[in-house]
């Protein structure tokens, strides 16, 4: 009997189980389905923002603009495609800080497709992840100067490297990169060792002076030298992955998205939004390069020179005005020119025009005008707030300043050379000699009708009020008038006067000689 009771009890349990199974099946849910149910992976948008070429203020402004577009489109993953050999430290620091702030609202990834060298490494480590294509490189961020005679040595080098190491420390703390390795990208004297953490089983990196001393926590006997003290750390993709700087090494962009989707448990919605620099942004960056800036400065000065040595207001003056507008506009869009520098430049131009058109000779207005123009131009080479004096404050700022000075200096040298060529050879070319104003003076001993083009020294003596003369170079309203054998700087009373116009002296005040047109 006890056996029968146990058998009945088992049969009852089996029947109840079968009943439950049938109920679940009737509801269209299987036991296997219930165990396999998992929440749906979230769908996210991504944007690819291309960052290539020299790192400068133009790239910084472009990155800010395109990042805002990506965020407005709802992108939650910001993939910055890095292709650069470096650039200006100040601009790289601006981009680095921008990446850190962008990481507070979206997930930032540095996707290195070729190389991230020098300043390129600096901006890359400020992204939350670094993903590298196979056989790409990252590192080598020691500061250098453009001028061989201005090498960074001693305290000056340490001051500069200390600042850059601080930037890399900031990135290491924010994004969990090996601090010692990042610092060894900046300074050669840093020796880094790789030591296994016995607790976590992971490798950690320490500078020689900061080696741990606890043998229970670290495998000190098997430490390995990772970076020598005579090298700057530069890593290929596979080494960067091994050292914990790169999160992944992939074959293509699809592999990068696959890694992120698998690791973060997300699904990327559709194709990523790809944002490249605009042609206008590339143009501004190109214009601000030292070589192009030198050409613009040279053309502007040459245009002014030709304009004031040829009759009328023509193409040379227009070309000079366009070059000046391009220089100022590009600096403003580049974030270098504030209203103070622009105002200084324009005031200088006005003073120079007053000196040229209203005052004879060259005096205080001309000196102040040239000084103001130079201050405005040099001020545009330094990034500063409007309420700050535009002056380099550290070696890095001086290095950036040197880029601009090279352009201005090269342009001035080119102008002097071309102006010399024009002054020497242009009057000898019959088909072009009419472009330059050279007064014709008949020398004694020559036959009538044969004019030898010579330019006698300007004189301001031997003339008096009421004396008549002939305009030898166009008066706008300043210019030169021939009174007998003397060529005198004068100012016309009103209108511009062409060469050959008869004029009369109506006032003399020191060096200021005022003339008026003589009516026939």
Image (cartoon, helix red, strand yellow):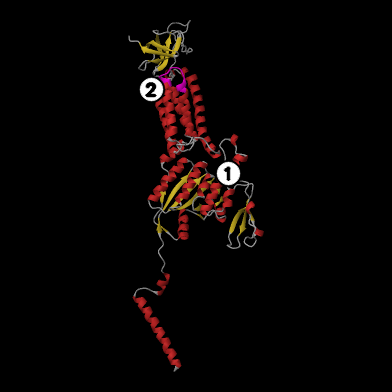
Of 353 and 512, the residue lying toward us: 512
Q: Secondary structure at mark 2?
A: loop
> Which part of the image, by quadrant, shows the C terminus?
top left
Does residue 395 sit above or below 439 in this rendering?
below
At a point 42% along the width and 67% down the height, the residue shown is 38
Q: Is residue 282 above or below residue 514?
A: below
Which residue is at the front of the view, 192 or 248? 192
Q: Measuring from the top left, give residue 215's x and y in whole percent.
A: 65, 61
Q: Is residue 379 visible?
A: yes
Question: Residue 395, located in which quarter of the rendered image?
Answer: top right
Please indicate whether residue 404 sits to the left or right of residue 519 in the image.
right
Q: Is residue 480 in the magenta section? A: no
Is residue 360 found inside the magenta-colored segment of the image? yes
Within 10 Å of disc 1 (Cα), the crowding (few <14, some 14-19, many 20+) is many
Q: Which range of residues does the magenta coloring cover?
A: 355-366
Nearest the viewer among 30 and 348 is: 348
Furthest-left residue in this view? 520
Measured as percent of width and height from the top left, residue 343 is found at 42, 31
Q: Residue furthest front?
A: 387
Q: CA distance from mark 2 to mark 1?
A: 53 Å
- Label annotation for residue 313: 2
Q: Which residue is mark 1?
A: 161
Which tag, 2 or 1, sits closer to the chain's start?
Answer: 1
Q: Residue at x 38, y 20 (%)?
A: 312
Q: Secondary structure at mark 1?
A: helix
Tag in front: 2 or 1: 1
Query: Is 214 placed left or right of 347 in the picture?
Result: right
On the image, the x and y values in percent for residue 500 come to 38, 12
């Amino acid at each position: 009997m006890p056996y029968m009771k146990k058998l009945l009890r088992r049969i009852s349990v089996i029947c109840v189980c079968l009943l439950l199974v049938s109920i679940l099946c009737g509801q269209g849910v299987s036991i296997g389905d219930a165990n396999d149910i998992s929440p749906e992976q979230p769908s996210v948008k991504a944007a690819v923002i291309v960052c290539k070429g020299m790192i400068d203020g133009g790239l910084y402004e472009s990155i800010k603009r395109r990042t805002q577009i990506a965020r407005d489109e709802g992108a939650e993953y910001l993939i910055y495609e890095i292709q650069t050999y470096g650039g200006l430290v100040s601009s790289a620091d601006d981009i680095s800080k921008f990446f850190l702030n962008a990481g507070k609202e979206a997930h930032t990834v540095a996707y290195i497709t070729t190389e991230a060298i020098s300043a390129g490494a600096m901006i890359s480590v400020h992204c939350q992840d670094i993903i590298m294509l196979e056989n790409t490189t990252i590192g080598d961020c020691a500061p250098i100067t453009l001028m061989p005679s201005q090498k960074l040595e001693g305290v000056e080098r340490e001051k500069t490297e200390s600042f850059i190491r601080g930037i890399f420390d900031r990135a290491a703390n924010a994004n969990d990169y090996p601090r010692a390795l990042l610092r060894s990208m900046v300074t050669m004297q840093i020796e880094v060792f790789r030591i296994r953490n016995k607790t976590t089983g992971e490798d950690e990196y320490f500078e020689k002076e900061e080696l741990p001393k606890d043998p229970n926590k670290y495998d000190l006997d098997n430490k390995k030298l990772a970076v020598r003290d005579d090298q700057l750390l530069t890593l290929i993709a596979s080494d960067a992955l091994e050292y914990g700087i790169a999160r992944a090494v992939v074959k293509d962009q699809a592999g990068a998205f696959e890694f992120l989707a698998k690791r973060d448990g997300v699904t990327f919605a559709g194709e990523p939004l790809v944002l490249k620099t605009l042609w206008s942004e590339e143009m501004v960056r190109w214009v601000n390069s030292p070589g192009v800036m030198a050409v613009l400065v040279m053309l502007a000065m040459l245009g002014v020179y030709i304009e004031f040595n040829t009759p009328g207001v023509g193409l040379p003056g227009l070309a000079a005005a366009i070059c000046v507008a391009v220089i100022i506009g590009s600096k403003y869009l580049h974030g270098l020119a504030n209203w103070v520098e622009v105002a200084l430049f324009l005031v200088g131009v006005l003073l120079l025009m007053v000196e040229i058109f209203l005052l004879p000779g060259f005096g205080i207005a001309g000196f102040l005008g040239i000084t103001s123009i130079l201050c405005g131009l040099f001020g545009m080479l330094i990034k500063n707030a409007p309420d700050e004096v535009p002056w380099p404050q550290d070696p890095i700022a001086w290095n950036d300043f040197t880029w601009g000075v090279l352009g201005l200096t090269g342009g001035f040298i080119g102008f002097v050379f071309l102006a010399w060529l024009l002054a020497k050879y242009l009057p000898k070319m019959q088909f072009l000699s009419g472009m330059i104003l050279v007064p014709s003076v008949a020398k004694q001993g020559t036959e009538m009708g044969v004019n030898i083009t010579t330019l006698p020294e300007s004189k301001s003596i031997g003339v008096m009020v009421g004396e008549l003369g002939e305009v030898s170079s166009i008066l706008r309203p300043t210019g030169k008038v021939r009174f007998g054998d003397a060529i005198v700087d004068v100012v016309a009373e009103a209108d511009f006067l062409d060469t050959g116009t008869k004029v009369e002296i109506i006032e003399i005040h020191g060096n200021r000689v005022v003339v008026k047109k003589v009516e026939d």
